[in-house]
Image: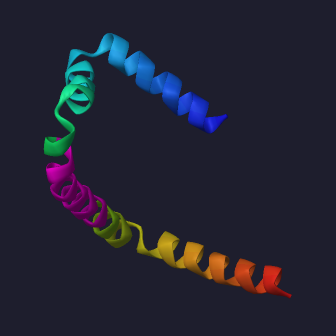
Amino acid sequence: MSAGTVAILLLVLIAFDDRVRDHVSRRFVAHPSVELASAGRQLQDLTTVILGAARTQSLGHAPLLLFALAAAVLTFFMLRT
């Protein structure tokens, strides 16, 4: 159900936003060899952005992060037994 929701949201964005439409069309219309060569760089950029966002969020929400980590550990031990 959630995958369908994401697909519908993406289709709506493609239909209404020119920037999204151009970006998606460049991904599907481009030559596969060019896309394969740039896939590593795009993955590295995405990883850098995700790690930067995680670092920023963890510094801003450290108490909540510690609480969530403790809850995950306790849940793990509870389900293990």
In the visual, does 62 lie left or right of 27? right
Residue 81 lies in the magenta-colored region: no
Q: Position of residue 19 (x, y in %)?
A: 20, 22
Residue that appears at 51% across and 22% down: 8
In the visual, does 49 lie left or right of 81? left
Quarter of the image for residue 31 reads top left
Task: Please tell me whether the stretch drawn in magenta is mainly helix, strand or loop.
Answer: helix
In the visual, does 3 lie left or right of 18? right
Residue 47 lies in the magenta-colored region: yes
Question: Which region of the structure is painted magenta?
Answer: 35-52
**Which color scheme does this rendered protein use?**
rainbow
Q: Position of residue 45 (x, y in %)?
A: 19, 57
Residue that appears at 34% across and 18% down: 14
If the image is split into quadrants, where does the C terminus sit? bottom right
Q: Position of residue 12 (x, y in %)?
A: 43, 16
Residue that appears at 27% across and 29% down: 28
Q: Is residue 76 above or below residue 16?
A: below
